[in-house]
Amino acid sequence: MKIRTVVVGLGATGRAIASSLLRRADVEIVGAADRDPRVVGQDLGVLLGGVANGVVVVSDPAELPAADLAIVATVSDLHRAADVLLPLLERSYNVLSICEELAHPWRSHPDLARRLDDTAKAHGVTVLGSGANPGVLMDTLPLLLTALTQRVESVRIRRRTDMSRYGAILAKFGLGLTPREFATARSRGEVVGHHGFEQAIGALAAGLGWDLDSVDVGEVEPAVVTTSPRVGDHMRIEPGQIAAVTHAARGVLKGDVVIDLEITFGFFEPADETAAGDDYRIVGEEQVVGLRSSVGFDSFLSTVAAAVNASAAVVEARPGLLSMGDLPARSVAAKGERRAGRASLGATHSRDRESTTWGGRPTWKESGTA
């Protein structure tokens, strides 16, 4: 039986999620909603560049038909997202959202987390925050890696995230501003950087049984001011404007930094001083566990995949507010059908970008910032 699904939010990420769902044999999209008047009234299939499928985009989620699952790709702020999430739960939709602050809101938004949990349980459905980060890359993945040591001393992660595929969310990073404009916008609270550090650290600490003293989130800082134009799918960055920023956060336990996270977000070029790749270092009692991706995990593609792959798991999970770490690993594994003619193990293709290194005591290389 197919999972009847509606999609709320048809920005760049929402459209990519919807396009992926249309290719799934186990999902049927029966409704879509977005506030943008340019897309309201359009056929979803046509909007996504395909053939008409009879699903007409509506402006109000309240107009959506009954379904098993609602996937919400709207805003990062949980208070704003809750205005959409709660009515969907009250209509007995299972809900999966890429709102970063939903990933593990028990520490950062305790009252709202309880309300979401109570509402979901009262209607026998599940609500889940999913995505690349938080969701997988800075919480569930390192939590899984800690299974290789019996006692963890610290977790340290450095990531470089390509933002060139994103659209509306770029404003919160201050990309495309001059350094002076950036400073002004940050002082006004218009540039806030990454939403989700508190949730990623909270989820990781909860999994490790750590009751942290504090979660300290620093200010987002400029990392690269470009000297040449850089072009993304939805933005062009001109010389003299900020092309990358760095944001970091720390989890403190008994006075020690035990979780140390840092991400550089931007439109990158090979000549940038900012080191490419993602690095994980978990200091354990018996060994140091390291993982490195030399090119980095693609944030946009990973967010889409995490949401799509968790769709069936949300419908099948126990009622209430859950995080990705609450779900069995096999339930969120990729389920898309393998296409004929793709490379087998050992083959080399120019599009094969992944490169990871595992080791007991790897050499740790800092991902510097420009």
Image (tube, rainbow, N blue to C red):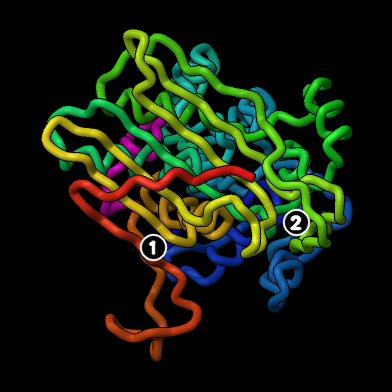
The secondary element bearing badge 2 is classed as strand
* Mark 1 → mark 2, Cα distance in angstroms: 24 Å
Q: Position of residue 221 (x, y in %)?
A: 68, 33
The tag on residue 1 is: 1
Say which quadrant the C terminus sits in. Answer: top right
Q: Disc 1 residue type?
A: Met
Mark in front: 1 vs 2: 2
Comes first in the chain, label 1 or label 2: 1
Left or right, residue 275 beside residue 26: right
- Image spot of residue 284 (x, y percent): 19, 33
Q: Is residue 327 placed above or below 249 in the rendered structure?
A: below
Any part of residue 4 in sight: no
- In the image, what residue occupies the spot 45% across and 12% down? 214
Q: Give the answer, above or below, for where 19 lies relative to 109.
A: below
Q: Amino acid at mark 2?
A: Val
Give whichever of 44, 337 is nearer the camera.
337
What residue do we see at 22% from left, 29% from top?
A: 152
Please give the range of residues in magenta. 316-332
Q: Quadrant of residue 25?
A: bottom left
What residue did someone put label 2 on?
Answer: 57
How many dots with numbers?
2
